[in-house]
Image (cartoon, rainbow, N blue to C red):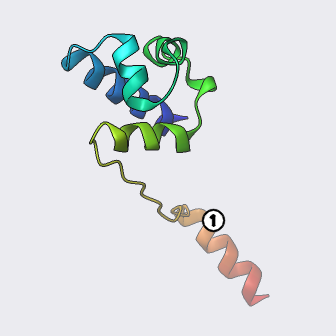
Amino acid sequence: MRARSGLMMSLTEVIRHQGMTQAQAAALFGVTQPRISDLMRGKVNLFSLDTLIDMAATAGMGPTVKVSRPKAAPAKRAARRVAVST
């Protein structure tokens, strides 16, 4: 959800910064004007991450995806060692 909302805010900023109308933005991204209205209003649940990444790439933004392993808390690591050694 955080990635989608961040992309939506960035796309909205680009549209406003370039002074595009919603109709012009819709033509650029190949969607309808009401779809751009949903974007501008921050309706996160209506957009997939894939769609937003495609739109960002079309806008020349160069989006990236970073995946990292979760860090286990020290107490959980110790508990795993105890369970394995018994």
Image-based side of 76 in relation to 83, left or right = left
For residue 64, side relative to residue 69 (left or right)? left
- Crowd class of label 1 (few under 14; some 14 to 19; many from 20; radius 10 Å): few
Q: Say above or below: 84 vs 18.
A: below
Query: Whole-percent x and y of residue 82?
Result: 70, 80
Looking at the image, residue 1 lies above or below residue 72 = above
Q: Which residue is at a point 37% across and 28% down the rendered structure image? A: 28
| Residue closest to the eye, 43 or 83 | 43
Q: Residue at x 58, y 30 (%)?
A: 47
Q: Is residue 60 left or right of 27 when viewed as pictured?
A: left
Q: Residue furthest right?
A: 86
Above/below status of 1 relative to 82: above
Looking at the figure, which quarter contains the N terminus? top right
Residue found at the far bottom of this picture:
85
Indicate the position of residue 49 as horizontal and vertical percent values: 54, 41
Quadrant of res 25: top left
* Picture coordinates of residue 29, whole percent (x, y): 42, 31
Secondary-structure class at tag 1: helix
For the C terminus, which image quadrant? bottom right
Image point 63% across, 25% down: which residue? 45
Give above or below for 34 relative to 5. Answer: above
Residue 64 x, y percent position in the rendering = 37, 53
The residue carrying mark 1 is 76
Q: Residue 48's quadrant in the figure?
A: top right
| Three-letter amino acid code of the residue under disc 1 | Lys
- Which of these two is toward me, 8 or 54? 54
Query: Residue 23 falls in which quadrant of the image?
Result: top left
